[in-house]
Image (cartoon, rainbow, N blue to C red):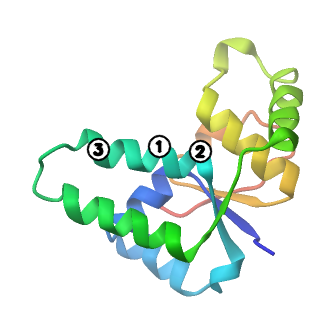
Amino acid sequence: MARYLLDTNIVIAAALGLPGVLDRLSALEIGDVALSAISLAETRAAAAAAGAAENNGRLAENIALLAENLDVLPFDRRAAEAYGALLRKLDPKRRRTLDRMIAAQALDLGLTLVAANSEDFDDIPGLTVEKWA
């Protein structure tokens, strides 16, 4: 069972080959790390937005490789219910939809969220966050 859920910015950092993130990932068992389908969609969108840039092909390939080797967790009914419950606890002006959906999924599954911008999640009660980049 996974212990960590990677936020989108960490997936992109890994796909770009940032050593600190790759070092942390390589120290874990593959089954310890999961990826939300939301993050997978966001990373694929980022690769597509990079368009014809020289590194776009490599970025897309690396994202696909990560997705093949990590559990990709669906955003299902349970996650949706956890998201709704989370939003009832937060200031509505601070809603960042996709971040909140990923955080709700981590909370529901009891996973530690791994992010580069951990401060974006400071207002989420009960969420355990590790900053890797």
Query: Is the residue under label 3 in contact with that under label 2 (CB below 8 Å)?
Result: no
For residue 42, which numbered disc appears in the image?
1
- Identify the element where label 1 is drawn: helix
Q: Can you give x and y, in whole percent of width and height, for residue 76 in the image?
A: 78, 44
Residue beneath disc 3: 48
Q: Identify residue type, mark 3.
A: Ala
Residue beneath disc 2: 38
Q: In front here: 55 or 112? A: 55
- Identify the element where label 2 is drawn: helix
> Would you say 38 lies left or right of 5 here?
left
Which sits earlier in the primary sequence, circle 2 or circle 3? Answer: 2
Q: Identify residue type, mark 1.
A: Glu
Distance (Cα) linking label 2 and label 1: 6 Å
Q: Can you give x and y, in whole percent of width and height, for residue 28 in the image?
A: 63, 84
> Would you say 18 lies left or right of 34 here?
left
> Would you say 46 lies left or right of 20 here?
left
| Residue lying at 50% horizontally and 45% vertically, measured from the top left | 41
| Residue lying at 51% horizontally and 72% vertically, measured from the top left | 68
Q: Can you give x and y, in whole percent of width and height, for residue 23 in the image?
A: 47, 81
Distance (Cα) linking label 3 and label 1: 10 Å
- Identify the element where label 3 is drawn: helix
Q: Quadrant of residue 46?
A: top left
Query: Is the residue under label 1 in contact with that under label 2 (CB below 8 Å)?
Result: yes
